Image: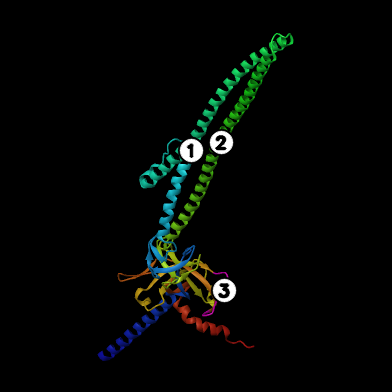
Amino acid sequence: MLERLLRLGGERLFLYTATLLVVGLALWSALGRIDIVAHATGEVIPSSQVKSVQHLEGGIVAEILVREGQRVAADQPLLALQSISSDAQVDELGVRLTALALDVARLQAEAAGSSDLELPPALLRDHPAESQRTQALFRSRRDNYQSAIASQQKAIGQREQAVAEISARLRNTRNSLGLIDEQVRISNDLLRDNLTNRYNHLALLRDQSNLRSRMDEDAIAVRRGELAIEEARSQINGIRHAHEQEVKEQLAAALREHDELQQRSRRLSDSQSRTVLRSPVDGFVKTLHVVTQGGVIQPGKTVVDIVPADDRLIVEGRLPVYEVGHVSVGQPTRISLSSAESTRFGTIGGTVIHISPDTLVSQDSGAYYRVRVETNADHFASAGQRYQLYPGVQVDISIITGTRSVLDYLLTPFLGYADKALQER
């Protein structure tokens, strides 16, 4: 009897347990939810434009200083090119520019008629020997110019003195001629009355003629002297004009050459500074378009692509065409690494932010829609370890398009067959 009761109790316990399990499974299948996902493959990309580093003139690669994936700071050297211009050329231009600056200062002082040359303090301090030579040249040219003017002025003074002496003598001769003319008139009257002899009268006529000849000679001499004075003054004006014109032309030529050499010097300096290509921003080296030392860079071509460090990273994926009808912007996602590391680091969340309006075609995967997902984190983390996301990292994207119960999941195949049952074409 006892054995029968025990057997009956065990059967009931099994029945109760089985009933509870069935009820529990039924409740779990009815209430439990599973995600409906659309799968896509993709890679991490920067959300904004990659910074492309180019070189204006191009050149030959002397040294590659970074590698792809390396983090770089703003203004950090990336690549060194062989210098087109030598330091000797730059130094030679500097010497020539200094000489021209001194010439310009000297010629400006000469054009202004200054008695002394005042050079800029920077030239006196940095180039004392050249400054002294320039000041000596200024004094020499000033003295030669003043000497030429003084020589003509002295000649004018001498000629003016000679003209004054001749003019005084001419006045005396004119006075004497007036007296002789009076004597000749008196002698004519006396000769007519036979009160004097003809010999004395001829002597007076001879004196009158001599005085007139002397007056004519002196008048010519005065005129000749005045012409000489005018010529000397004209020569002074010519010397001044020639000097001014010479200084003006030399100054214009010096200024023109100085400007040309300054521009050439700036180009050489800029070219030398551009022999080292530097990063424009903090970031990561995405692509090195030149990998060979001694390689040639074409003018204006991109050399390095830099992804800004503070840029927000997103995931760009390829969604199969048959999945696009289930996917919409704003849906949540789970992102995992495509490599074996996915089991170690798990997933991070994200949100769909873009779906391409039309299909794109790839030779590898055929037609697909491009989707972009904004991640909730910039790294994977597991057990204190961290896997940082960088542009180019390959990932798998699971887009959660909805949820359904386990029971619905289990019954869907049968319901599908039921819909097609009892039908005939």
The one nearer the camera, 397 or 291, is 291
Residue 390 visible in the snapshot: no
Is the residue 308 above or below the residue 116 in the image?
below
Instruction: Give x and y (percent) for residue 402.
Output: 48, 72
**What is the quadrant of residue 312 in the picture?**
bottom left
- What kind of residue is marked 3? Thr
Task: Report how far apart the C-alphas of labels 3 and 2 lie in the structure.
Answer: 92 Å
The one nearer the camera, 217 or 40, is 217
- What kind of residue is marked 2? Gln
- Give the magenta range: 356-365
- Name the main secondary structure of what is drawn in magenta: loop
Q: Which structural element holds mark 3?
A: loop
Task: Report how far apart the C-alphas of labels 2 and 1 lie in the structure.
Answer: 13 Å
Which residue is drawn at the image coordinates 25% and 89% (left, top)? Answer: 2
Residue 235, numbered circle: 2
Identify the residue under disc 3: 359
Disc 2 or disc 1, which is closer to the eye?
A: 2
Identify the residue under disc 1: 145
Furthest residue to the right? Answer: 192
